[in-house]
Image: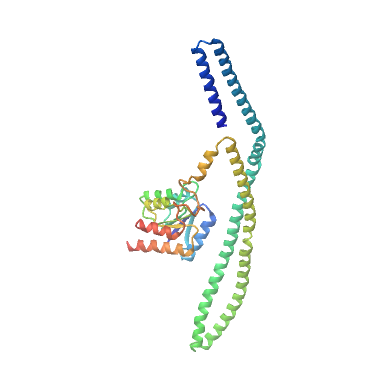
Amino acid sequence: MKILIVDDFSTMRRIVKNLLRDLGFTNTAEADDGQTALPMLQSGDFDFLVTDWNMPGMQGIDLLKAVRADPNLKDLPVLMVTAEAKREQIVEAAQAGVNGYIVKPFTAGTLKEKIDKIFERIEGN
Amino acid sequence: MEAHDKLMAEVTIEQARNLLRCLESGDLGSAREAIDGLTQLREANLFLEVGKLTRQLHEALANFQLDSKIAGLAAQEIPDAKDRLNYVIETTENAANKTMDSVEACIPLSEGIEAQAEALSKDWKRLYRRELKPGEFRELASRVETFLKQVSGDSKQLNKQLHDVLVAQDYQDLTGQVIRRVITLVQDVEDNLVALIKMFGGSEEYQKAQTQKTKTKGVEGPVIDKNREDVLTNQDDVDDLLSSLGF
């Protein structure tokens, strides 16, 4: 299981990386915005994407839309971890095809719960 | 002021009627006098307006002091505040990294202790059940001895890392002081802006804007205002919204 973590703050990437490692996901890579992340996703063999929304360059929502529009990436599970919590934004992310949505600040428990749920659903299909 | 205007209007109407009466009755002498009266009235009004303008000029000069204060804010204090806020970002980032350095150093130590303790306790139980051969007992005894030494050393390291985590929290005091100063500056800027708005006669618009509900489009980071109706405040609300959308 190879996971890409996208956030413009290195401390947040480090937190997510540590929490994922504790959940048994040791194969992770990092990018600081959508623009850097998209080519990594296109050329790498990632199985999962964790992304922030508010980033300079390409924002998380645009990265999500680009992933869904790419025939090779369209089924990649995407978990959004963001401080953006407006009702219309969550609806927008859902319509764009996000698989999970976590609002910051979040706990290790929430991250585990959402990841488990995403994989349960994928395995159920 | 209104009463004055009303009185002036009444006087003017009365003088105009008087002029009309004089003209209709053919009394041209009185009519000329009436016209002079009206002219005087207009001049009196003109003096009044000049008086008003003089007062406004005086006020504007007095307010010049406010302008020089704004110049100081723009030239010195706001750039200084930007430096201060950048310092907050740097300091909190350093503290977060220092804390995570320590945590990442602690994790393998505690994981090692856990793994060794579990392996030893399995063999310890075998010892109680008298399942150990004499050779195995000697080996277990030496492993226990090594483990105890190891735990003692690791605990010292854990302690050191925990103290580093503790000390790394000093950023809260430092950044708190800096942020408090920036808050004072923001208050100062607000007061000056409000004074400027009032000076240019925008009080009404200002009051209207105060009661308006702000709604920002697009990204805005964490929302602090808990009364905002367009924002969900916790993960449970987000989950509820998503499940109502079929998630």
Residue B240 or residue A8, whichever sits in front? B240
Q: Position of residue A9 (x, y in %)?
A: 53, 53
Q: What colour scheme does the image use?
A: rainbow
Relative to B228, say whether B136 is above or below. below
Query: Split into 4 quadrants, where in the image is the C terminus of chain B?
Result: bottom left
Residue drawn at x 50%, y 84% is B125
Residue drawn at x 54%, y 22% is B12
Residue drawn at x 62%, y 43% is B78
**Can residue A42 be seen in this snapshot?**
no
Q: For the image shown, how many numbered marks are present on the structure? A: 0
Query: Split into 4 quadrants, where in the image is the N terminus of chain B?
Result: top right
Relative to B3, is A58 on the left or the right? left
Relative to B179, is A114 on the left or the right? left
Q: Position of residue A106 (x, y in %)?
A: 49, 60
**Can residue B55 be seen in this snapshot?**
yes
Relative to A46, is B43 on the left or the right? right
Relative to B143, say whether A8 is above or below. above
Q: Position of residue A95 (x, y in %)?
A: 37, 51
Residue B156 or residue B84, whichever sits in front? B84
Residue B246 or residue B72, whichever sits in front? B72
| Direction left: furthest residue | A125
Residue B179 or residue A11, whichever sits in front? B179
Q: Position of residue A27 (x, y in %)?
A: 47, 61
